[in-house]
């Protein structure tokens, strides 16, 4: 194999500003005027809107807090067929049916379900019916209340009554 006989893999570079006959003379392929035609220009970021108020500043600011640590694993009933005995989130993590970061479990779906005793945070009606039809049992763990919810009175008397005007 002769290295000097190989076909060229790179094309010749574009020589700009060498007269109008070259096709890249005068404006050198940059067009006429504007920021992109200037020497030393810098492209603005994609989010720049030409001086208009940017979208990220136009939208209203979000209030509150979303706990991203509260991950719920959603598992279909028919995927529980390989398990036996009492089934909970820890057992599903061992079987790699639920992600390790999951803190809650929801079982959903229809189809064939094994005879298991399921301990879950949430379950759909169809999934519960399928497990009970197979002879299993479902225990739903009550959701823990926050300190603020525990202090709130249950009666509707917390609504403010209109004050009498003493005029």
Image (spheres, rainbow, N blue to C red):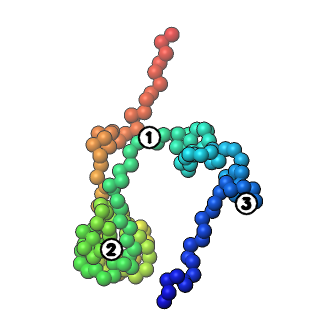
Residue 37 falls left or right of residue 3: right
Q: Earlier in the sequence, mark 3 or mark 1?
A: 3
Q: CA distance from mark 3 to mark 1?
A: 57 Å
Specify few, some or many for label 2: CA neighbours under 10 Å numbering under 14, 14-19, or 20 or more: some
Residue drawn where x is 31% and y is 41% of the image:
148
Q: Earlier in the sequence, mark 2 or mark 1?
A: 1
Identify whether 166 is placed above or below 31. Answer: above
Secondary structure of the residue carrying tag 1 is: loop
The foreground one among 57 and 63 is 57
Q: Nearer the viewer, mark 3 or mark 2?
A: 3
Q: CA distance from mark 2 to mark 1?
A: 34 Å
Q: Nearer the viewer, mark 3 or mark 1?
A: 3
Q: Earlier in the sequence, mark 3 or mark 2?
A: 3
Secondary structure of the residue carrying tag 2 is: loop
- Pinpoint residue 164: horizontal percent, then vertical percent: 47, 18
The residue indicated by pointer 2 is 97
Residue drawn where x is 43% and y is 73% of the image:
109
Q: Quadrant of residue 93?
A: bottom left
Residue drawn where x is 35% and y is 62% of the image:
72
Identify whether 52 is placed above or below 114. Answer: above
The foreground one among 145 and 21 is 21
Residue lying furthest top in this view? 167
The residue indicated by pointer 3 is 23
Q: Quadrant of residue 74?
A: bottom left
Q: CA distance from mark 3 to mark 2?
A: 63 Å
Residue drawn where x is 39% and y is 34% of the image:
157
The residue indicated by pointer 1 is 63
- Pinpoint residue 115: horizontal percent, then vertical percent: 30, 80
- Pinpoint residue 10: horizontal percent, then vertical percent: 56, 72
Residue 87 visible to the viewer: no
Identify whether 12 is placed above or below 55. Answer: below
């Amino acid at each position: 194999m002769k290295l000097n006989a190989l076909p060229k893999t790179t094309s010749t570079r574009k020589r700009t500003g060498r007269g109008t006959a070259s096709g890249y003379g005068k404006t050198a392929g940059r067009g006429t005027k504007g920021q992109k035609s200037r020497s030393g220009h810098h492209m603005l970021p994609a989010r720049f809107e030409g001086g208009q108020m940017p979208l990220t500043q136009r939208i209203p600011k979000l209030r509150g807090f979303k706990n991203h640590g509260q991950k719920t694993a959603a598992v279909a009933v028919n995927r529980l067929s390989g398990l036996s005995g009492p089934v909970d989130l820890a057992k599903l993590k061992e079987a790699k049916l639920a992600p390790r970061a999951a803190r809650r479990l929801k079982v959903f779906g229809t189809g064939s379900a094994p005879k298991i005793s399921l301990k879950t945070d949430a379950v759909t009606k169809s999934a519960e019916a399928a497990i009970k039809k197979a002879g299993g049992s479902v225990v739903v763990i009550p959701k823990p209340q926050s300190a603020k919810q525990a202090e709130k009175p249950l009666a509707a008397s917390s609504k403010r009554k209109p004050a009498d005007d003493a005029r």
